[in-house]
Image (cartoon, coloured by chain):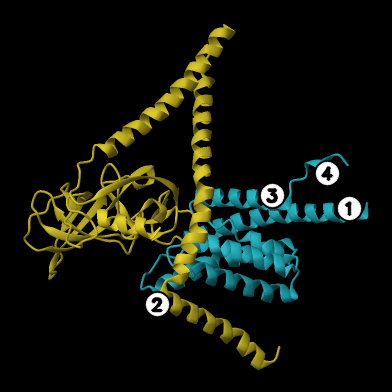
Chain colours: A cyan, B yellow
Amino acid sequence: MRWRRWRVPAPVFWLGMGSAALWCQEFLGGRDVLVPFILVWLQRGRMGAAFVAAVLVTLVQEGLASFALGATLATAGLWAGFVLAAWRLDPFNPLFMAGFSLYAAWWIPQAYGTVAMLHDVVVPLPSFFQILVQASVTWLVWVILNWLVARQDRYVSVSAAT
Amino acid sequence: MRPRALVLAVLLPLVVYVGLYTWNAKTGVIDRLTAVLGLDVAGWVFRPGRALERGGRELWERYVYLVGVRQENEDLRAEVRALQEQVAQLSEKSAEAKRLAALLALPPLEGWERRGARVVAQRPGPGMVLDGVILDVGHAHGVHEDAPVQAAAGLLGRTTRVGRFFAHVLLVTAPVSRVPVISQEGRVPGVVCGQGADEPLDVRYVPLGQPVAVGELLVTSGMDGVFPRGIPVARITAVSVGEGALFQKVEARPVVPIDAVEEVVVLQRPQAAAVEAGGQ
């Protein structure tokens, strides 16, 4: 097939997506755009890929954070929350994705706030509207990534069949 | 899942986390690791992002300029377009040159060296809960922690976490920022405390009966040994005295337009710079 020659290699693709997500994060005033990079793998039950993504995302977010170990706590809470939520629910259901985006938008500032509190610093927590905006961003990026990964999976299965 | 396993699944990560937290508080290993890996990696991503953003802005400005042009002659139209592109580029360069000239015109501070730097990111992620920016200088450039950072208009903040090529700056508006100051006219001491990006600065410990006026400039007093003396920090916006209060209640606004800062200078003592360079 012709388009196969133009397929972007996976590492280049993810590097590009990760860089774009980081720029978006700054452009959107510090809203989290990297979380869906973990969720998209957890959703598929590909724990190895999810773990690698979680380590990379956590390292970058830790590097950008004001206090150490906030991003670690945030990622751990997300992972645990996802495992619990996906235990009985379908992680591909759009309602699940919307609901979990809302949870992520609420949890992440709580995690950073908790670590700030350990340093005796009280940071203002986001308003409900800010949580909704963050949840919309997470959901949108997640939907896009989900579509891209599904497309990639289809490509791999078609290539294997032919 | 059995109760014992459930308890273990909850307690074990908690113990590991608290252990990591305590170990990091004592040794700072995770801080250093994330500063080198996370901060530097993100910094390299942000730097071209800023350049792309500037290019996009220039392109957009040029497009807007061209919308109103109604030239019949195609040659003239092309020439106008070329000239406008040139003007847009030159005006951007001229604005940058003005900002850099303002930095260069800062009076020399005895016992301090200056190092130019650019802001590569502002509020880059959800974890930056304290107001801060990221600069494109790090240990490799001789910059160390707690180095004062100055913009043309005055004090911006100080470096907190420094990677090899990039550094975090804690802004004067951050809730944990404390800068000892003195009023320029009345020479009244105080401490400027940040309260968050959208809040006024709180000037604490200003003694009762001392002359401070709205509009007066507050400059660093140099009493803490971190900031050199005489850098403008903020301008007083409100003064009041509460009943039974021991100090005056003073509010101020930073002199630096924080969201618009692009170039800064990092101040460092020569011996500190030499030690950093020697450690490389």
Whether residues under marks 4 and 3 lie with C-beta atoms below 8 angstroms apart, the answer is no
| Residue that badge 1 annotates | A158
Give the side of residue B93 with respect to residue B49, left or right. Answer: left
Spatial CA span between label 3 and label 1 = 19 Å
Reply above or below: B23 against B80: below
Reply above or below: A111 against A162: below
Among the two numbered marks 4 and 3 on one chain, the one whose residue lies closer to the N terminus: 4
Same chain shared by disc 3 and disc 1: yes
Among the two numbered marks 1 and 4 on one chain, the one whose residue lies closer to the N terminus: 4
Pointer 3 local density, CA inside 10 Å: few below 14, some 14–19, many at least 20: few
| Residue that badge 4 annotates | A4
| Type of amino acid at the residue the image marks with label 2 | Lys
Task: Residue at 15% x, 59% y: name it.
Answer: B240
Outermost residue toward the front in this view: B278
Same chain shared by disc 4 and disc 3: yes
Which image quarter is the C terminus of chain B in? Answer: bottom left
Task: Residue at 38% x, 57% y: name it.
Answer: B131
Looking at the rendered structure, the secondary structure element under dot 4 is helix
Numbered label attached to residue B26: 2
Task: Residue at 45% x, 67% y: name it.
Answer: B31
Image spot of residue A53 (x, y percent)? 64, 63
| Residue that badge 3 annotates | A13
Among the two numbered marks 3 and 1 on one chain, the one whose residue lies closer to the N terminus: 3
Looking at the rendered structure, the secondary structure element under dot 3 is helix
Spatial CA span between label 2 and label 4 = 53 Å
Image spot of residue B231 (x, y percent)? 21, 49
Spatial CA span between label 4 and label 3 = 15 Å
**Quick check: can you spot residue B229?**
yes
Same chain shared by disc 1 and disc 4: yes
Whether residues under marks 2 and 1 lie with C-beta atoms below 8 angstroms apart, the answer is no
| Type of amino acid at the residue the image marks with label 3 | Phe
Numbered label attached to residue A127: none
